[in-house]
Amino acid sequence: MNEKVTPIVDARQLGIPKMLILGIQHMFAMFGATILVPILVTSYFHGEGLSVQVTLFFAGVGTLFFHLCSKFKVPAFLGSSFAFLGGFATVAELDQGRFAGMSYGEKLPYATGGIVIAGLLYLVLALIIKLVGVKRVMRFLPPVVTGPIIICIGLSLAPSAISNASTNWLLAFIALATVIVFNIWGKGMWKIIPILMGVVVSYVVALILNAFGMTNPDGSAILNFASVSAASFVGLPPFTICKFDITAILVMAPIAIATMMEHIGDISAISATTGENFLEDPGLHRTLVGDGLATSLSALFGGPANTTYGENTGVLELSHVYDPRVIRIAAGFAILLSFIPKISEIIGSLPSAIIGGISFILYGMISAIGVRNIVENRVDFTKSRNLMIAAVILVCGLGFSSGLTFNIGSTSITLTSLAIAALAGIILNAILPGNDYEFGVNPDGDINRGLAINPLHEDVDHAANIDDGK
């Protein structure tokens, strides 16, 4: 029988040292996944991708900004979003119109410019929710639409995982196995940081193999520390200003549909865990504004999109300390780390095979989460309308591999496969009769809308049951 543990809502009673330790715990929970995004994006852009320093800086600043917008009430941490990885990969390979002849580094600011617009879409949704209510809005974005879109995001990235892993299958397997072991059999904090442990364990193995003179199958060195030795211990993050192009915007903006649903799921999960209804107070519109502006601010200066992290919700359940001040301490640590270039270069020396091994499971898990989104929300596929909507989304999302290019005047515009899939799904759901989805009827389903690799679903369910008196 589970006993109800009295939560701590004001961590100041624990004293500053314990608050600092709790903040470090939250930082470790987000660290592995947050730094993995710039590492993956850099592989798409052949070494000219996102900066780890900038990513950590805006994870911290974005979290603080979110807390400001949500009246300092919601204990949420904002880390890098996996949802936009497919968009980055697509922009990296654009070679038409403005992008013809561009280097990978020259294309990157246009990708972050698209994320700025995606973040601003949160404000549009927040305004609509404030005016007409969340239930009416969610009828246009039910799980039968968002679930298949998330599935497409993961599957579209699968070739990248295979390509990276194939550079050294041994390291890739060790990274993959470590993530699985910690995610399935880990206890307490270890269960919440599977990605970080996958990186650390496989990197230690790479150090050992490199020390014994072993190389990758193609003869290249497993590790290269030239950039690490040249990096300074203290330095400003390399901020860059984004650029805007309609094609890149149309690549990135539709992904906001998935990330906004992820946000709603994460806020629902935090509410269930803490026993507070943050959808009502401070209000979903405020949390959406905070998340959206934090994302746009990050991308404006060359960072990735931010999103509320399920991993940190797991830490809340683990520690039973629900004070947002602890999360803000973690944000401060992230900002502090962003001013240490040496750490950034050590992370950048991570072998491609380790990246491949971790993304091997990550990309598949994103698609599996899309399936979970559908199952937990009890989407009825005995209904022809639901089958048709899902079928069209999947075919569009996976079939239009090169997108759809057309001209408006002298401007060449490319709709990516994900944009086409999102438009098709939303339109079909709006015009086909029989839409019976209502947000809030199935709280467990509403929670499971996020892309976090390990939101500790069973623990959040337990917290929800405690809150209901079950």
Image: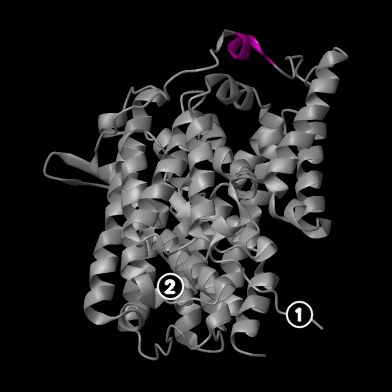
Numbered disc 1: secondary structure: loop
* Residue type, numbered disc 1: Glu
Name the mark nearer the viewer: 1 or 2: 1
Please state which of residues 97 and 72 is positioned toward the viewer in this rendering: 72
Q: Which residue is drawn at 41% across and 25% down?
A: 104
Q: Mark 2 points at which residue?
A: 278
Q: Residue at x 43, y 83 (%)?
A: 439
Report the magenta residues as a range.
Answer: 224-229
- Residue 83 is situated, as x and y percent measured from the top left of the image, at 48, 52
Residue 78 can be seen in this image: no
Which image quadrant: the C terminus? bottom right
Q: Could you say which quadrant of the image residue 312 lies in? A: bottom right
Q: Mark 1 points at which residue?
A: 3
Q: Which residue is drawn at 37% across and 74% down?
A: 281
Q: Which residue is drawn at 24% across and 72% down?
A: 128
Residue 75 can be seen in this image: yes
Distance of label 1 from label 2 (alpha carbons): 24 Å
- Residue 219 is situated, as x and y percent measured from the top left of the image, at 77, 14
Numbered disc 2: secondary structure: loop
* Residue type, numbered disc 2: Phe
Q: Residue furthest right?
A: 212
**Residue 226 falls within the magenta-colored stretch:** yes
In-image side of 55 versus 412 (left or right): right
- Looking at the image, residue 424 lies above or below residue 194: below
Please state which of residues 303 and 395 is positioned toward the viewer in this rendering: 303
- Looking at the image, residue 263 lies above or below residue 344: below
- Looking at the image, residue 9 lies above or below residue 347: below
Q: Which mark is residue 169?
A: none
Quick one: label 1, few (<14), some, or many (20+) residues within 10 Å?
Answer: few
- Magenta highlight: main SS: helix
